[in-house]
Amino acid sequence: MKLILKSKKGEDIEKVLKRYRNKIEKSDLIKEVKKHQEYIKPSQKRRNNLSKARYKQFIKYSIY
């Protein structure tokens, strides 16, 4: 995936970098890279999802 960013004539480099960071965030490129850094077995993914669901249920029905 390519991210092409053209700078305008006389534009400050800080503004160009900020636009570049925003473009990367919106394209979810960072999420994709982090997702592929480590292999997670399907059983571990299910376990993680179950623990998240349990936590959400606990928060939803806990008494304050």
Image: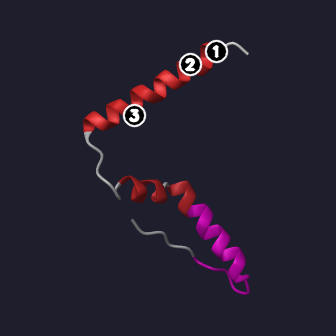
Q: Residue at x 60, y 66 (%)?
A: 21
Quarter assignment of residue 38? bottom left
Q: Which residues are magenta?
A: 6-23
Q: As rendered, which of 3 and 18 lies closer to the eye?
A: 18
Above or below for 19 versus 64: below
- The dot on residue 48 is 3
Marks 2/1: CA distance? 6 Å
Residue 44 drawn at (x, y percent): 31, 37
Classify mark 2: helix, strand or loop. Answer: helix
Mark 2 sits on what residue? 58
Mark 3 and mark 1 in contact? Answer it, CB < 8 Å: no
Q: Amino acid at mark 2?
A: Phe
Which image quadrant: the N terminus? bottom left
Classify mark 1: helix, strand or loop. Answer: loop
Above or below for 17 versus 38: below
Residue 17 drawn at (x, y percent): 64, 74
Mark 2 and mark 1 in contact? Answer it, CB < 8 Å: yes
Q: Residue at x 39, y 34 (%)?
A: 48
Mark 1 sits on what residue? 62
In the image, taking residue 14 as reference, residue 37 lies left or right, namely: left
Q: As rendered, which of 61 and 27 lies closer to the eye?
A: 61
Q: Amino acid at mark 3?
A: Asn
Q: As rendered, which of 30 and 54 lies closer to the eye?
A: 54
Whichever of labels 3 and 2 marks the residue nearer the N terminus, that label is 3
Label 3 crowd (10 A; few <14 / some 14-19 / many >=20)? few
Classify mark 3: helix, strand or loop. Answer: helix
Q: Of all residues shown, which one is farthest toward the bottom?
A: 10
Residue 37 drawn at (x, y percent): 35, 59
What colour-coding does the image apply? secondary structure
